[in-house]
Image: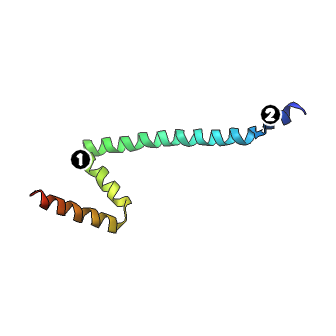
């Protein structure tokens, strides 16, 4: 077995395939890190414009949900508030 074949299958593992998978994950993690930085910058911009970042995050979370889920949560929140006299 020559050196190339040994690199390709060490211990029954396709080294090239494994290396490719690991490198793809590493690239995506770098992209995610860059995107997280971009999102942080946008929230900083929103805060400096006078917006409440905590509320913006809540709205983003709500927009990801199904309308029926949002309605159910709002109904429960209203019931709980009334129960507590709020």
Q: Position of residue 63 (x, y in %)?
A: 35, 60
Residue found 32% across the figure and 58% down from its top:
62
Residue projecting furthest to the top: 3
**Residue nearest the viewer, comparing 5 with 13:** 13
Q: Picture coordinates of residue 10 (x, y %)?
A: 78, 34
The residue located at (33%, 65%) in the rendering is 69
Looking at the rendered image, the quarter that the C terminus falls into is bottom left
Mark seen at residue 52: 1
Which residue appears farthest toward the right when viewing the image?
1
Residue 25, image quadrant: top right
Identify whether 35 is placed above or below 85: above
Q: Secondary structure at mark 2?
A: helix
Task: Give the residue at the far bottom of this rendering.
Answer: 68
Local SS, label 1: loop
Q: From the image, which quarter does the N terminus lie in?
A: top right
Answer with the quarter of the image where residue 68 lies. bottom left
Q: How many marks?
A: 2
Q: Considering only order in the chain, which callout, 2 or 1, is on the residue closer to the N terminus?
A: 2
Binning the other alpha carbons within 10 Å of mark 2 as few (below 14), some (14 to 19) or many (20 upward) gives few
Q: Dot 1, crowdedness within 10 Å: few (<14), some or many (≥20)?
A: few
Q: Is residue 34 above or below residue 66?
A: above
Q: Looking at the picture, tell me which residue is in the foreground, 4 or 38.
A: 4
Mark number, residue 7: 2
Query: Is there CB contact under 8 Å for labels 1 and 2?
Result: no
Identified at 43% across, 42% down, the residue is 36
Q: Is residue 13 left or right of residue 39?
A: right
Q: Residue at x 80, y 38 (%)?
A: 9
Per the model, the C-alpha gap separating discs 1 and 2 is 55 Å
């Amino acid at each position: 077995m020559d050196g190339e074949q040994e690199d390709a299958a060490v211990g029954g593992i396709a080294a090239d395939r494994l290396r490719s998978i690991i490198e793809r994950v590493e690239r995506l993690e770098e992209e995610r890190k860059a995107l997280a930085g971009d999102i942080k910058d946008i929230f900083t911009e929103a805060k400096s414009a006078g917006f409440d970042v905590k509320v913006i995050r809540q709205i983003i979370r709500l927009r990801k949900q199904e309308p029926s889920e949002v309605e159910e949560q709002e109904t429960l929140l209203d019931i709980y508030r009334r129960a507590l006299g709020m």
